[in-house]
Amino acid sequence: PPAAPPAPASSASLHARAARVLTANWTGASTVPSRSLYPHQWSWDSAFIAIGLRHVSPLRAQTELETLLAAQWGDGRVPHIVFNPSVPLDAYFPSPDFWRSSTAGRAAGAPRTVQTSGIVQPPVHALAAWLVHRADPGLSRARGFLARVYPRLAAWHRYLLHRRDLGGGGLVSVVHPWEQGMDNSPCWDVPLARVTPAPARSFRRADLDHGAAGDRPTDLDYGRYVRLAADYRDSGYAEGGAFAVEDPAFNALLIASEHALARIAGELGAPATARHARAQRLTAALVDRLWDAERGMFLCRDLRGGEGGGGSGVLVPELGVSGLVPLLLPGLPREVVTALVRTLRGPHFGLGGRTRLVPSYDLLGAAFDPHRYWRGPAWFNTGWLLERGLRLHGVTAAADTLREAVLDLAGATGFAEYVDPFTGEACGTTGFGWTAALALDLLH
Ligand code: 9WN
């Protein structure tokens, strides 16, 4: 794709400030998303963080991914949280004593020496590994970085493609909203409504010690998250629960990572064409199962919805930013790309118009809330993914607008977790890992 315009004059200090956040959040082997709100290692955060960290320290970026992959389960899953044993149990909920990975996850091959959650997050890791390699191929080769991570990344994709194709149509399903990473998106409202919430007195929300209640999910949401996760744990982390959704961003990130894995295979002298072909088949399945031509974007498929709940499910008519993320894929039909760009610029997402940064949910949707987490606020990782997609498809002016917005707001908010999409006001926590990392990446 064409190169980005030169960085603004203040970029030197933005670069230094972003690098300082990553240093402050570094624990010695990985980076926490936030010292206060998220004091452990998170899976997709680590992938985004490594993508920025490669510009500051390629060695730390490699280590970040290696630490995460060292906690991989025998069945191939990469857990969404790797717990830091020196952090007190009550600092984050749900803590290791909730997930009980080394006992409840034994049949699925959970590691014995490290405590993890039992759910997953979007597979951004092969893409991150490839970008980290490219930042310093000499160091990467000297350390055997790709040769060591490749088998683990391949097993991770195998787990998703073989164990998580719950709809039988070739796409991967998430079994918990935390897996998709946009926890309280209105896209989950209908599928989650079938879940009986765990009683509020049965758990304590540590997040409210650090974040404003109005910026976070509700207690009712948490009751449902807890019930779903506990049921999954009690089944020994085997699939088949009440929630199963095919999500466009999760699947698009898998496809982007499958393309990256093909490049990694090529670099290692292994065959790559079968992987590119698989990525192309997955792209066709994505369009086939989740594209909504009328709305001009991808939707989620609720597999437990529709008549009797046993069929191929139904599309959820909510417009979440997840449905725009497939724009980062190279092999999309031309008309899909054109429609996605139109939707991004139109009244529902307002790029270049009403919003400063792309909102997480439809500006015109009934559930829109500019402050509440994934129900409207703008997030920096989705901004980065869409910037990449726009640039890939040659929509350079819009990519430049988005890049500037990410850099301006990241700097102005002290690297906020998310922002009000209209005013740019900081929400959630500040000093947030992927905000700093992805701003760094866009400066390069
Ligand atoms: C639950 C760490 C994570 C992100 C998610 C974001 C939030 C956790 C929480 O924080 O989720 O996994 O406690 O709310 O929604 O995308 O990975 O930054």
Image (cartoon, helix red, strand yellow):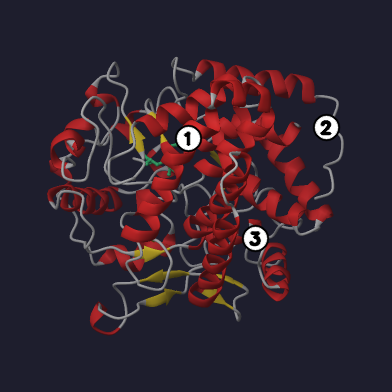
Vertical order, 429 against 361 (above or below):
above
Pointers 3 and 1 in contact (CB under 8 A)?
no
Nearer the observer: mark 2 or 1; the answer is 1
Residue under numbered circle 2? 7
Report, in whole angstroms, how far the alpha carbon at label 3 lies from the one at label 1: 27 Å
Secondary element type, mark 3: helix
Which residue occupies the foreground of this view, 426 or 406? 406
Report the residue at 47% width, 51% height from top: 374
Q: Is residue 110 left or right of residue 52?
A: left
Please report whichever mark, 2 or 1, sits nearer to the chain's N-terminal start. 2
Residue under numbered circle 3? 327
Q: Amino acid at mark 2?
A: Ala
Q: Is residue 258 left or right of residue 344?
A: left
Residue 425: x, y in percent? 60, 39
Ligand 1 positioned in quadrant: top left
Report the residue at 28% width, 38% height from top: 117
Residue 26: x, y in percent? 49, 18
* Label 3 environment density (alpha carbons within 10 Å; few <14, some 14–19, many ≥20): many
Residue under numbered circle 1? 149
The answer to whether any part of residue 302 appears in the image is yes
Secondary element type, mark 1: helix
* Label 2 environment density (alpha carbons within 10 Å; few <14, some 14–19, many ≥20): some
Query: What count of labels does the image hold?
Result: 3
